[in-house]
Image (tube, rainbow, N blue to C red):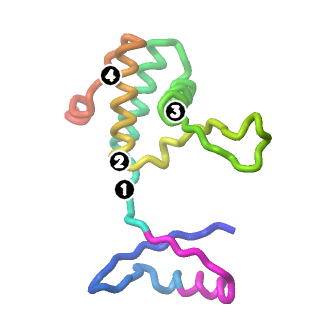
Amino acid sequence: MITPTFSARIMDGKLRFFDKERLKEWLKKLTGKPLTVTIKPKQKKRTELQNNLYWLWLTIIAEETGQDKDDIHDFYKTKFLTRTIHIKGMDLIKREAKVIGSTATLNTRSFGEYLDKVQSHAAQFFGVTLPNSEDYYQN
């Protein structure tokens, strides 16, 4: 079952939903079921400009290294977005696993930090100077 997300705002001390009718329809489907409710501040996902710059950079790095840009994308995700998770119930020898995050889930700040790492790494290890975002968007 896909769980929808509902946008809301606190106004005058009350939680106000933007799409009340959609929320009511969803709640009807859940009548009598135990629920978990999570409320968190909305985070802005990476911008289209950030995404475009990133893929431009991947194209430049791919051309300079002779690699496929999707392979370069996977390389940087593995390098900068890998984390270790601990799994209960796994065999005693291996209770942890490495998982690779997705750039699509990064907010604007986190994606900006990721871009900084990619730009720095490309310069240091591949000898590739990537255009700064200011240079790219002034054209």
Looking at marks 4 and 2 on the same chain, the residue that comes earlier in the sequence is marked by: 2
Q: CA distance from mark 4 to mark 3?
A: 18 Å
Please provide the residue range marked out in magenta.
24-39
Can you tell which of label 1 and label 4 is closer to the viewer?
A: 1
Secondary structure beneath label 3: helix
Q: Amino acid at mark 2?
A: Thr
Residue highlighted by disc 2: 108
Mark 3 vs mark 1, CA separation in Å: 20 Å
Magenta segment's dominant SS is loop
Rendered residue at 40%/52% (across/down): 45
Q: Residue at x 57, y 25 (%)?
A: 71
Mark 3 crowd level (few <14, some 14–19, many ≥20, 10 Å Cα): some
SS of the residue under disc 1? loop
**Is tag 4's residue or tag 3's residue first in the polypeptide sequence?**
3
Q: Are marks 1 and 4 in contact (CB under 8 Å)?
A: no
Give the SS element for disc 4: loop
Q: Which residue is mark 4?
A: 130
Point 37% across, 11% down: residue: 127
For this orientation, the residue located farthest to the front is 92
Front one among 107 and 61: 107
Q: If the image is split into quadrants, where does the N terminus sit? A: bottom right
Say which quarter of the image contains residue 122: top left
Q: Which residue in the structure is indicated by mark 1?
A: 44
- Measuring from the top left, give residue 55's x and y in whole percent: 43, 32
- Residue drawn at x 39%, y 76% is 8
Q: Which residue is mark 3?
A: 77
Mark 3 and mark 2: Cα distance apart in space: 16 Å
Q: Amino acid under label 3? A: Lys
Above or below residue 37? Residue 106 is above
Please provide percent x and percent y for residue 113: 35, 37
Amino acid type of the residue that numbered disc 4 sits on in the rendered structure: Leu
